Amino acid sequence: MIRSIIIDDEEKGRNTLRNFLKKYCNNISVVAEGDCVKSGLEKISTYNPDLVFLDIQMPDGTGFNLLEKIKEIDFKVIFVTAYDQYALKAFKFSAIDYLLKPIDPEKLIDAVNRLSDIEDIKSINKKLEVLVGNNNRFEKIALPTVNGVHLVKIKDIIRCESESNYTTIFLATGKKILVTKTLKEYDEMLTPMHFYRVHQSHLINLAFVEKYHKGEGGFVIMEDGSEIEVARRRKEGFLSELIRF
């Protein structure tokens, strides 16, 4: 049995989640509840849970603040939040699961199953390190692989290449990381940070473009020596973005 704590300042939200867990996730027991950062910390210290369902906005701080106050996190976390653009972006960069209010029972089941079957505490801690450490700057990203999680600085990513349902990340150090997410997901996250998807299979960091060669679509040479084809239909947008950059 997985021992869980619900930390949410809204009683209605706590009741709904507790009832859904009882109905749909019979492998999880709710051992305590908190309604703010202070009480949440007290419950975690007292009950030593396996899993915490954590709200973002609370009267005395945020769920992020709560995690910052814990020296060593030895439990898993699923965030439960109303729509918040910054929070959702933060979750994507840290590859951490979250549930939007009102909670969808199917998504709750999926989130619980992913934590139960795949993630270990070490991986969770790496993701939480990115989540808390970014602190509005989005300097790091968590890259989930079949063997765990890699933390890298976004500025060190030269390019991303599609590998079916996986993505290979090429770093300035020469290291390559095969990630268990699609290129589309990294396109959505990194394009606002001066990356550009020049081809269906390639997302590049404009900071590492060394030269562009003209052609029907042309191709770029990156600082690591790689030659990346530019799709004809993406050429105009890419050149415009490159000039602005």
Image: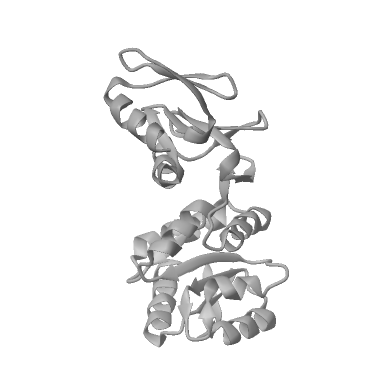
For the point 61% across and 60% down, the residue is: 133
Asked if residue 39 is positioned above or below residue 91 in the image, the reply reads below
Residue 230, picture quadrant: top left
Return the x and y of residue 214 as percentages of the image width and height.
Answer: 37, 14
Residue 115, picture quadrant: bottom right
For the point 41% across and 70% down, the residue is: 81
Residue 87, picture quadrant: bottom left
Most foreground residue, 72 or 154:
154
Q: Residue furthest left?
A: 233
Most foreground residue, 201 or 50:
201
Return the x and y of residue 117 as percentages of the image width and height.
Answer: 55, 52
Q: Residue furthest front?
A: 243
Asked if residue 48 is positioned above or below residue 108 in the image, the reply reads below
Specify whether 237 is left or right of 170: left
Q: Is residue 108 visible?
A: no
Asked if residue 7 is positioned above or below residue 158 in the image, the reply reads below
For the point 51% across and 65% down, the residue is: 78
Return the x and y of residue 223 as percentages of the image width and height.
Answer: 58, 25
Asked if residue 215 is positioned above or below residue 113 in the image, the reply reads above
Q: Residue furthest top?
A: 215
The image quadrant where one finds the C terminus is: top left
Return the x and y of residue 110 as percentages of the image width and height.
Answer: 43, 56
Specify whether 132 is left or right of 78: right
Q: How many marks?
A: 0
Q: Is residue 189 visible?
A: yes
Q: Residue furthest right?
A: 71
The image quadrant where one finds the N terminus is: bottom right
Q: How is the image coloured?
A: one colour
Most foreground residue, 16 or 129:
129
